[in-house]
Amino acid sequence: MATMMTTWKARVYVTLKPGVLDPQGRAVENALKVLGFAEVGDVRVGKYIEVGLEAPDREAALARVAEMGRRLFANPVIEQFRYDVTEAGAGAAGAGVAGATGATGATGGATGDS
Amino acid sequence: MSAEHGASASARPWEEVGLTSEEYGDIERILGRSPNPVELGLFGLMWSEHCSYKTSKSSLKRLPTRGPRVVQGPGENAGVIDIGDGVAVAFKIESHNHPSFIEPYQGAATGVGGILRDIFAMGARPIAILDSLRFGELDDAKQRWLFGGVVGGIGAYGNCFGCPTVGGEVHFDRSYRGNPLVNAMCVGLVDRGRVFYGRAEGEGNPLILVGSKTGRDGIHGASLLASKEFDERAEERRPAVQVGDPFLEKLLLEACLELLDSGAVVGLNDLGAAGLTSAASEMASRGGYGLEIDLDKVPRRETGMTPYELMLSESQERMLLVARAGREDEVRRVFAKWDLDAAVIGRVTAGGRLRVLENGRVVADVPAAALAKDAPVYERPEAEPAYLKETRAFNPATLPPVGDPAAVLERLLATPDIADKAWVFEQYDHFILDNTVVRPGSDAAVLRLKGTRRGLAVTTDGNGRYVYLDPRAGAAIAVAEAARNVVCSGAEPLAVTNCLNFGNPERPEVMWQFRRAIEGMTEACQALGTPVTGGNVSFYNETLGENIHPTPVIGLVGALEDVERDQTTQWFKDEGDLVAILGPLGGDPVAGLGGSEYLKVVHGKTAGRPPALDLDLEARVQRACLKAIREGLIRSAHDVSDGGLAVTLAESCFGGPGPAVPIGASVDLPADATAAESSSGPSLRLDALLFGEEQSRVVVSLASAAEGRLKAICEAERVPLAFIGLVGGSDLRILVGRRPVIQRPVAALRTIWKETIPWLMR
Amino acid sequence: MRWAVVVFPGTNCELDCHHVVADVLGQPVEYVWHKDTRLEGFDAVILPGGFSYGDYLRTGAIARFSPIMGAVADFAAAGRPVIGICNGFQILLEAGLLPGALRRNEGLKFRCHDVHLRVENGATAFTNRCRPGQVLRVPIKHGEGNYYADPATIDELERTGRVVLRYATPEGAVTAEANPNGSLNNIAGIVNERGNVFGMMPHPEIAAEAILGMEDGRLIFESIVASVEGRVAHVR
């Protein structure tokens, strides 16, 4: 018997670990200050990745995305990542749940087991 | 324009595609009926100035394009010359000015991508990139953004693709602040007998689209952007700029070269401006055949694309090829190995028509040659620009005498035009492919050709100020200086590619500049034996009514007989070497001050007449210099250009990237050149002697034992020669008639020269 | 001995490495496509520089999953020499065959110019033709060569002589000015614990001939030859 599959959209955010120098972040920080944003403190630049995937339920989707993060998206030596998963198309269907139910996974890279 | 249907059914449909009612009439005559909206869109693009050269064509015919070395002249993806030993060189320069102004990083990157494809379309492996760049002055944040973005984009593309960027030039002038120039040149190598052409031949042969998938990006990019002047709405056209993928282009290169080796390919063409429309109509018209394209077969990145969009998309990293019938699977196999699409999208037909089908329905059916070749040719009116009365009236003799020559030298070295460009070329991989013998920073880059004794010297040159002040002389000087740079590097100048950057040709003054520049270029190319094998015209370099300085850029390729023996750099090498000048010293008392960097920087003027150029003397100086280099007499050679003799001497002292280290020199220039007051005849002013840009001069250094032989060579060629001093010490000392006029530590001058651009771009 | 030059999609220094091995050293060399899975019959493996997979996502991050990388790991486990240059170094790090990571250059720009490298360990399979303390002139050309590892790893590399090359002045002084990219401890090249896997950011293959104005890079290749052909006792 086939499992009912649902389409999910994962959002993955990859950033440098705290303590690892981020030259891009520093450049952006300086630029902001030059532009008059005196209130600016620490700036970190990272990557944002969207992944569409099929999974029977949210937990399964989260588990797969965590695996992707560990194996590919982040280099555990210098990077960490976090992610969330929403049902794709829910917003478009007008069901009124868009963005409301994002599940968030834990930081994957910090444990660095890849 | 509605992207849905191409041109809409308005009362004046031609206006929507940028054509005139007369041109629309021509199209109706050609077709024997009114064009449908898709067809009109195709004509609108192919008959745009950018694609059709309808304004420049008649003038360009004057340029010399033949020579014993020329394998392929203008009209193909790139020109090709034969350099002997069975090796041919494919090379071309092209502009990407307008896209780079809108998005400097991607605009410049895709400019590099386009010129690389032109070269490998000829079956050649690209071995060098050069970039000729112009921006406004760097005291303006927008200009710094443009400059940084363009350099970053060029580097990103070339570095990732794996072709070294070995040279080029960067100049800064207010006239470019609303319209930077980004001209990219590429040089490639191909076996003499294996040059490929962009031709569709052989009825029934499959037409195959390879590389990237087709999307909506860049529709109207090159043609519309480059065929209209800019206004304040230019920013809104941002979506027309494409994004480059150098990684994919590298795969495309390897796949294409691998496939060409198999013998399965009849013809190959790049997809650039006007995308599929241009590539298909050009291949068909060159081959004398027709093409049928089934749009349903085109791999796409987006859904719902119309025939009009598919035909006009300027998605990057695509090539069109005609293969031999029956070998389609071979093509697919090679491209699959490189993870690339290869889709048979049509076939070659007899009869010369370009037929485009969608869902089995003909959506366009026009003669291919009508699109590619039959745009009307215009003889636009010309008129001498009014500003010339004023600029010619300026007499440099009215300038106050130069105050502190050393301070002036320092100021010139700190001018971005003259200052060290390491900030630029250190962002480019200039080593890859293991051929770079002379790196960026000397007069020309030198590449060895593995497996032979030969080498290539390549350069780009152009001086917008000179051309602004006298288009004919300025364009001739661009050719002469490019050739001189190549000679100074040890090579014989062989052939030219040109990128003609001008303003709006609908203004008679711009047409006048353009025609005079072509005349000057023609004369110089004839005198120096360097035919033009192709290039690019970029009109409408104008923003809000302000035209750029007319800027023809010359890309020149020369060959070294023996690269190990002949390769020469501009840097002084050994203590005790003699310093000499080949070429004239003196004559006109204000020689070389008109249009000079000195006049602009110190006196704030772009005026006067550019330096006189005697093409016969120029040819003799170049012959003498090359002969001396080939005989092994010359340790360094540097052509005298921006900033004059003092700057040339300073630069010769600075040492290069790599092994050449800074070293001093002490020279004493002949007093009679400046003994104005005492003698009756005209003699040179001190400012003209030190900073004038008189042409046809080369500063060389040589071992003292070579003195006699150099004298004999110069005598035989009737070339003036003056021994002026010695290499050595740690200072640059310039005396005039034993009177010291400049003395500075080389290290201090070098620091000023090195720090300028990094400091401005910090 | 036979050399393998591994080619990933986007590798672009393969021609240069091949040229140096074949034409300068005069040794047999073959390209190995990344989809291959075998390295039998080879005595040394080069992972050349370039932009494998466009450097998209992260340098070397995608290439490390190429089929050939299993064979590279086995080859390394068998104690045979593997050298990764620039992007090849990045791939070895991503694959875990060497410790640490390479971040973007501190100045954020791609840098292409000569650097001077002090040989810190002249007893490896990759530097046995150099004197300890010898200064080599070799160019860099990279945007992400800023070496990083956690303090414990750096400490271990330093203690065990695994920092093989360091950015230095022409006189051999290790200074901040001589560091082109912000690498910790001016690190330019390291070996693994066993001494047979070596990664370096500078490009020895473009500094191996007099006509190009630089010859010091040839020492790296000649060291590998000497080591494989048994002319050097293996010490680390």
Image (cartoon, grey):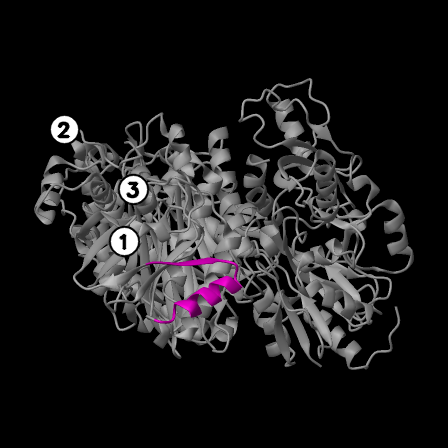
**Residue B220, position in %: x, y?**
32, 39
In this view, the residue in front, B667 or C75, is: C75
Q: Are marks 3 and 1 in contact (CB under 8 Å)?
A: no
**Number of the label disc, if any, that sits on residue B308:** 3
- Badge 3, how many Cα within 10 Å: few under 14, some, many 20+? many
Task: Calculate the distance from the C-alpha at mark 1 to the C-alpha at mark 2.
Answer: 47 Å
Chain of residue at mark 2:
B
Q: Secondary structure at mark 3?
A: helix
Task: Answer with left or right where residue A77 lies relative to residue B286.
Answer: right
Q: Chain of mark 3?
A: B
Dot 1 or dot 2: first in sequence order is: 2
- Which image quarter: residue A60? top right
The reply to whether label 3 and label 1 mark residues of one chain is yes
Residue B719's place in the image compared with B233, above or below, is below
> As drawn, which residue projects farthest toward the right?
C159
> Which of label 1 and label 2 is nearer to you?
2
Q: Residues within 10 Å of mark 2 (few under 14, many from 20)?
A: few
Residue B536 picture location, percent across and down:
30, 51
Most extreme residue toward the front is: A1
- The image shows residue A104 at horizontal and vertical percentages of 73, 30
The magenta segment is B326-345
Question: How busy is the neighbourhood of tag 1: few (under 14 within 10 Å), some, or many (20 plus)?
Answer: many
Q: Is residue B580 left or right of residue A83?
A: left
Residue name at image x 31 percent, y 46 percent: B311
Q: Which mark is residue B11?
A: 2
Q: Amino acid at mark 1?
A: Ala
Taking the image as shown, residue B671 lies to the left or right of residue C57, namely left
Q: Residue at x 29, y 58 (%)?
A: B534
